[in-house]
Amino acid sequence: MSAILKYVKFPPILYLVIVAPLVLVAACATRLPSTSPPTGAETSDSTTRAERLPSAAPTSPQMHEPQRVEKAVARAAAKTGKKPATKTPAPVASEQHFDEPKATVKTRPRIPPPPPLPPEQNGQVSRICQRVAKKLASISLDDCLSLALRPAKYYTANKQPIVVREFPPMSNRKPLGRVLLIGGTHADELTSISSVFKWMHKLKRYHTGMFHWRITPLLNPDGLLVNKPTRTNANGIDLNRNLPTPEWQQLSRDYWVKTTGRDPRRYPGPAPGSEPETQWLVEEIERFRPDIIVSVHAPHGIVDYDAIDRRSAPRRIGILHRDFLGTFPGSLGNYAGVHKGIPVVTLEMPHAYVMPSSQQVTHMWVDLVYWLQRNVPKIKMAKTELNGQALSYPTLDN
Ligand SMILES: [Zn+2]
């Protein structure tokens, strides 16, 4: 442009009308992004549309910047007319929020890392970490490998291991309770997986034994590790409708046919607990006997609570406000929360593809740990008082 201006003389009026706008356009063009904005993508559970997280596309580390993510959230909110949650101020996280009274933070004992895995299992974890890191922009290979995940000896239809990590109690401290944390039940809810990974890193850094944690960040690896992530597992079954709740045969099919109109994304399966992922979950609940379960989903942007007594339901966890979505035949909230007396906190991220900012991720974690700290002892006490009033629930055998 400057070369042209140097050699061609324009009358002043022509310069104002033709050349000046051209110069202006050229200058603006250098400031615009070279790529078109992300395409819309269907979110999993509602009619809202959010912009696609780079998670589903090739990894792009720059996209993790909170500002950029928040802009994406704002754009998605503008499309849906939903107020963005990005302006909620997050508290400044300090160590005592995570687990420990401030005075003892500096001297708290560190948990030893788990022992190394045998080569075969180590290879399985490395492979699944490589594949997960390719799908989720906010999780690097190192992020995944450094968590020392272990295969749970349960394999999906596509021969993927369900990987878990335990953060055990300290030898010198009685934990307040056992917490089972689950992400990625619906694998197209990408933020439900990434958020759990992020929280595991916080635990890795700050865990002091206040709770005994068992965590799987990805219950449904087959649903994630395909070209286009799916809500269902490799057999086309909604894992959150496949748990063996009472009268499953009748109720789940009725619900699927009459309420969902045979929605294939909500197919409950041929039998209760028919899927390896569900079998692992049922057995893990039996083995670990959690006092509470935290299950992460998207994109409703709320916190739900399924329990026999819902009075202590969290009113707010970070940017998520309380709302009750209802219980469904075969869902975890129904199975564990209602029929087994193990309360289930369901955290619904605001978007399936757009990660909350790192401040918001921290804010949710701080609020969750604080709520657990105040309520798990009460929940355990109430359960002890029930003592003997056994809650009947079916097992995989009947
Ligand atoms: Zn979900």
Image (cartoon, helix red, strand yellow):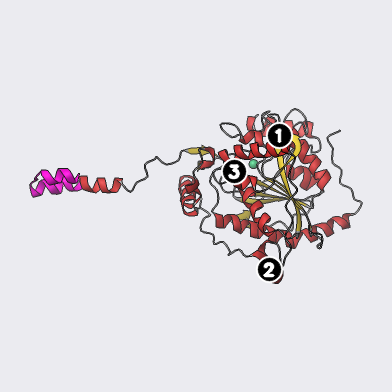
Disc 1/disc 2 C-alpha distance (Å): 53 Å
Q: Are marks 1 and 3 in contact (CB under 8 Å)?
A: no
Judged from the image, the secondary structure of the residue bearing numbered disc 2 is: loop
The overriding secondary structure of the stretch rendered in magenta is helix
Q: Residues within 10 Å of mark 1 (few under 14, many from 20)?
A: some
User: Of callouts 2 and 3, which one flags the residue occurring earlier in the amino acid sequence?
Assistant: 2
Q: Nearer the viewer, mark 1 or mark 3?
A: 3
Residue appearing at x 67%, y 45% in the figure: 217
Instruction: Give x and y (percent) for residue 97.
Output: 66, 64
Residue appearing at x 75%, y 43% in the figure: 334
Mark 1 highlights which residue?
255
Q: Amino acid at mark 2?
A: Lys
**Can you name the residue that lies furthest to the bottom here?**
103
Residue closer to the observer: 266 or 174? 174
Q: Amino acid at mark 3?
A: Leu
Residue 253 to residue 240: above or below: above
Q: Is residue 28 magenta?
A: no
Instruction: Give x and y (percent) for residue 87.
Output: 51, 58
Quadrant hosting residue 94: bottom right
Q: Is mark 3 within 8 Å of ligand 1?
A: no
Residue appearing at x 79%, y 59% in the figure: 170
Q: Ligand 1 quadrant?
A: top right
Instruction: Give x and y (percent) for residue 105.
Output: 69, 67
Which image quadrant: the N terminus? top left
Mark 3 highlights which residue?
141
Q: Which residues are magenta?
A: 1-21
User: Of callouts 1 and 3, which one flags the residue occurring earlier in the amino acid sequence?
Assistant: 3
